[in-house]
Image (cartoon, rainbow, N blue to C red):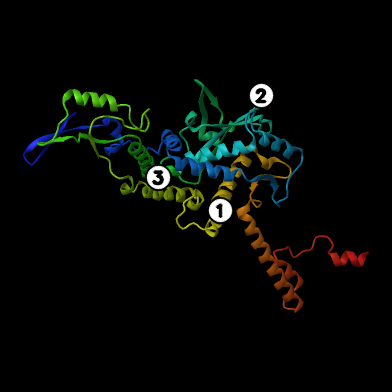
Amino acid sequence: MRLKFPLFGKKSIQVYPFFDLNNLSALDGNSMRADTTSVTGQMDAYMKCAPVAAIIQRLASAMATGKRFLLDKDGNEVVNSQAQKLNALLNRPNPIQTWAIFIQQLYTFYSLHGECFIYGLIPSGFEGQKDRIKALYIIPNNQITPVYTGKYIYQTERDQIVSSYIINTQGEQIECKPSEILHIQSPCPNLTDPLRGNSKLTSLEDQVTNIIAAYKKRNILIEYPVGILSNAGKDVSGTIPLQKGEKEELQADLKWYSIKRRRQIVVTNAALSWQTMLPNIGQLMLFEEIEDDVARICDAYGYPKYLLGFTGGTTFSNVNEAGKKLYQDTIIPESELIMEAVSNYLETFKITPPCRYILDYSHVEPLQESEQEKATAKKTIIEAANVAYSNGMITFEEMRIMIDMDETINGQLKNEQTANN
């Protein structure tokens, strides 16, 4: 392609654009949008949008730091034979995964799609008996489809609403009973189908699209030399235009030069002038756009942006506070929702005594300070209650209630034991 620019009545300067127009498709404003409302689009967002993958992966890693306990209604750990059997199943949910990997994968699908599906393998002849489950498998959301009965209101049993689940894997369709599938839905409501979960990405379509487009444009601007090569040679009459043979020879010589190609240093005898046709990356403010979009995604997922490495306004104090906030506002509440669903599916309420699974995070570093603060506050309350009791302002029972203890004493106090001895 040859372009001509007239210069004040003088003969035209012939210049030749040195770039492939196909490489500029992402710069023409017609880039494809990310469809974050569909399962496939959410998977694409996870694979193509680095911040989305980073946030979900870090949340999943944080979720996996919890220590799993099976507790009764009084908060005491249950360790009988029934509990040991369930713990053995969760310690090794299936032949290829440990609990840590299993819970991370579960939370990844849960965060990405707003719901996740787990298949419990029960031997033939023991259908519906959860204590016979031999393995647990997480089913990717694009491989499972619930089949509804068409009824919803006035139904009291799950199988009255969902007749079955169809799993499509390795070219085979497997029909499962509702009792075999654990379906965990996020609290983010699905406004079109109350029986399904809703991904937090649904409302982040613009942000995900902007980030993918910004990275792609940066890549194109960096990798491909887009501009105009013109002959810089001159004679007494002005600029000398390139002849047809010279142009073809020059194009053939330069076709190998770019960052991605084999040669990066141009060697030629031609007197050439280069005029870039690309905007300045800094002036496009792509970095600022990406940071703002990432902040919106962090808000939606409850992940403090300071933990992603943003340096602006970051201090040790707010990073430490961000870590505490991550667990208190996001990880712990969502772990309670997930483990409640797991407990109900495994029917831990049928164990003697009835119990439920929890994930405990009191040992993680960001919460250690919180535990210390709680201990200090409790000590202050105990000391104040003791002073009030010693001065005859409250009764012994009122003092115990004040320090969050039952007013009835179970067993003997230390002083009573000493007196008896």
Residue situated furthest front in the rendering: 236
Q: Which residue is mark 3?
A: 204
Measuring from the top left, give residue 330's x and y in whole percent.
54, 50
What element does badge 2 sit on? loop
Give the mark, 2 or 1, whose residue is nearer the N terminus.
2
Distance (Cα) linking label 2 and label 1:
48 Å
- Mark nearer the viewer, 2 or 1: 1
Q: Which residue is mark 2?
A: 125
Measuring from the top left, give residue 200's x and y in whole percent.
45, 44
227 up-or-down from 302: above or below? above
Binning the other alpha carbons within 10 Å of mark 2 as few (below 14), some (14 to 19) or many (20 upward) gives few
Which kind of residue does numbered mark 1 sit on? Gly
Measuring from the top left, give residue 303's x and y in whole percent.
50, 50
Distance (Cα) linking label 3 and label 2:
46 Å
Label drawn at residue 323: 1
Measuring from the top left, give residue 336's x and y in whole percent.
59, 47
Residue situated furthest top in the rendering: 171
58 up-or-down from 262: above or below? below
- Residues 111 and 84: in front is 111
Q: Is residue 367 visible?
A: yes
Residue at 63% over, 53% down: 365
Residue at 18% over, 34% down: 233
Residue 126 placement: quadrant: top right
How many numbered discs? 3
Residue 209 placement: quadrant: top left
Binning the other alpha carbons within 10 Å of mark 1 as few (below 14), some (14 to 19) or many (20 upward) gives some
- Residues 32 and 84: in front is 32
Contact, mark 2 vs mark 1 (Cβ under 8 Å): no
What element does badge 3 sit on? helix
Distance (Cα) linking label 1 and label 3:
24 Å
- Residues 179 and 34: in front is 34
Which kind of residue does numbered mark 2 sit on? Gly
